Structure formats: structure tokens, C-alpha cells
């Protein structure tokens, strides 16, 4: 790889620092960036991995976390509650291919494989990353001022559509349940 090729890749991926997610931080003045979301997931992975019933490769998990939203540097964040997921996979894959095109073939292949592994959610590592992704989104809503939520999030964040990912991991399911309980209380108090 030539240094100039790597700089081209860095130039594309650094946009994740400024791509805003739909989630707000605990500071009502600003939204979370995609890069902040991925960083928080990495911290969670390091902290929570010892509590998993099914052991995982933490280094692979950290790679998956780093890559899972890389396409959003081009496509932007598409919130799950929007329901606009028709073509999301295809547009993000095309974005990933654009982002990695300056890299040598073995680097391109690894990054694309990692991205696809996360999308398919068939390995223990990719399922763990999905759990972290869900937990981080829910937690972010827990700490954010509820007035920053989109109206449909007051019901969407309380659904348990992602519970299937947690069923094999008791500690993670307990954490998921705890956050849901706290979100439910937050919404009930807000609605009065």
C-alpha cells in the first residue's frame, strides 16, 4: 500500500466524526456522531465480553465495531424507526466499496468481509456487536432529554424487536431488560 492510498481511505473514513446520528447526547445542545457511537460500543465490548456465556474473539469484535457503520460516512445515518430500509444494504455496500477502493486488495477484502459478517449476524461476534449496537442506541435515548426524541421513538424505543439477539446471553438480556424498564419509566413520566 502506498501512503497516499491510505490517506485517501482516511479522508473518507474521518467523515464518521462529523456524520450525526439521530440520537442526542446527554447534552441537549448536540447530537451524537457515528464515530462516537462506535467508540462507545468498543468500550462496552471490552467491559462486557467477560460476562458472556458464549466466548467470543474480542479482537474480531473490535474490528466489526470499527467497520459496521463505515458506509455511513457516505450514506449518512438511517434511523431504524424510519422504516426506510429498502435498499439500505445495497447503498451501504456500494458506499463501503467506494471508501475502500484505494486500499490493496487484501485490505479491501477483509473490510468488506467484516462489514458483511456484521450485516449477516450469523457469528457469535457479529451477534454480540448487534447487541452492543442496540444497547448503545437504547442507552443513548435513556440519557438524552426526551424532548430530543422523534415522536415515533416514544413507542419504537419501547418495542422489543431486537430481543432475539439477546436470548442466548443471560447477562446481556438482563442489561437489555434493565434499560427497557428505565426507558418505559422515562416515557410514562414524560407523558404524565
Image: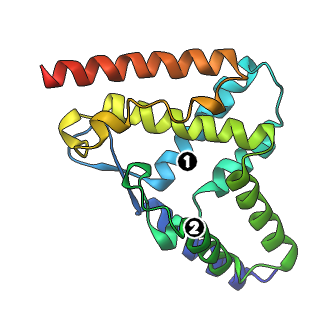
Q: Which residue lies furthest to the right in this view?
A: 106
Q: In this view, does 172 lie above or below 104?
A: above
In front: 123, or 40?
123
In the rendered structure, which disc, 1 or 2, sits on the residue that comes first in sequence? Answer: 1
Q: Which residue is drawn at 79% across and 37% down?
A: 124
Q: Are marks 1 and 2 in contact (CB under 8 Å)?
A: no
178, above or below 8, in the image: above
1 displayed left or right of 27: right
Residue 18 shown left or right of residue 155 in the figure: right
> Residue 19 versus residue 137: which sits nearer the camera?
137
Mark 1 closeness class: few <14, some 14–19, many ≥20 residues within 10 Å: many
Residue nearest the observer in this picture, 179 or 64? 179
Relative image position of residue 122 (x, y in whole percent): 78, 45
Mark seen at residue 114: none
Q: Quadrant of residue 82?
A: bottom left
What residue does disc 1 label?
38
Q: Mark 2 points at which residue?
A: 71
User: Which residue is rendered at x = 76% and y = 54% of the image?
Assistant: 117
Please provide percent x and percent y for residue 125.
77, 40
Mark 2 nearby-residue class (10 Å; few <14, some 14–19, many ≥20): many
Rendered-image quadrant of the C terminus: top left
Discs 1/2, front = 2
Q: Spot the residue most to the left.
A: 192
For this view, does 61 lie left or right of residue 24? right
- Residue 97 in percent (x, y) is at 68, 77
Q: Residue at x 47, y 15 (%)?
A: 178
Amino acid at each position: 500500500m502506498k501512503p497516499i492510498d491510505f490517506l485517501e481511505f482516511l479522508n473518507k473514513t474521518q467523515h464518521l466524526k462529523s456524520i450525526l446520528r439521530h440520537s442526542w447526547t446527554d447534552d441537549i445542545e448536540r447530537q451524537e456522531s457515528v464515530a462516537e457511537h462506535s467508540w462507545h460500543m468498543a468500550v462496552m465490548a471490552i467491559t462486557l465480553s467477560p460476562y458472556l456465556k458464549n466466548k467470543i474473539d474480542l479482537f474480531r469484535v473490535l474490528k466489526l465495531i470499527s467497520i459496521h457503520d463505515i458506509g455511513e460516512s457516505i450514506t449518512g445515518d438511517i434511523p431504524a424507526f424510519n422504516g426506510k430500509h429498502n435498499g439500505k444494504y445495497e447503498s451501504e455496500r456500494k458506499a463501503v466499496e467506494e471508501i475502500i477502493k484505494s486500499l490493496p486488495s487484501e485490505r479491501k477484502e477483509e473490510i468488506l468481509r467484516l462489514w458483511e459478517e456484521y450485516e449477516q449476524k450469523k457469528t457469535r461476534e457479529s451477534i454480540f456487536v448487534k447487541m452492543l449496537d442496540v444497547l448503545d442506541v437504547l442507552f443513548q435515548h435513556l440519557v438524552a432529554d426526551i424532548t430530543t426524541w422523534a415522536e415515533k421513538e416514544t413507542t419504537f424505543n419501547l418495542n422489543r424487536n431486537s430481543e432475539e439477539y439477546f436470548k442466548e446471553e443471560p447477562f446481556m438480556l438482563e442489561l437489555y431488560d434493565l434499560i427497557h424498564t428505565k426507558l418505559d419509566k422515562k416515557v410514562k413520566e414524560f407523558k404524565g
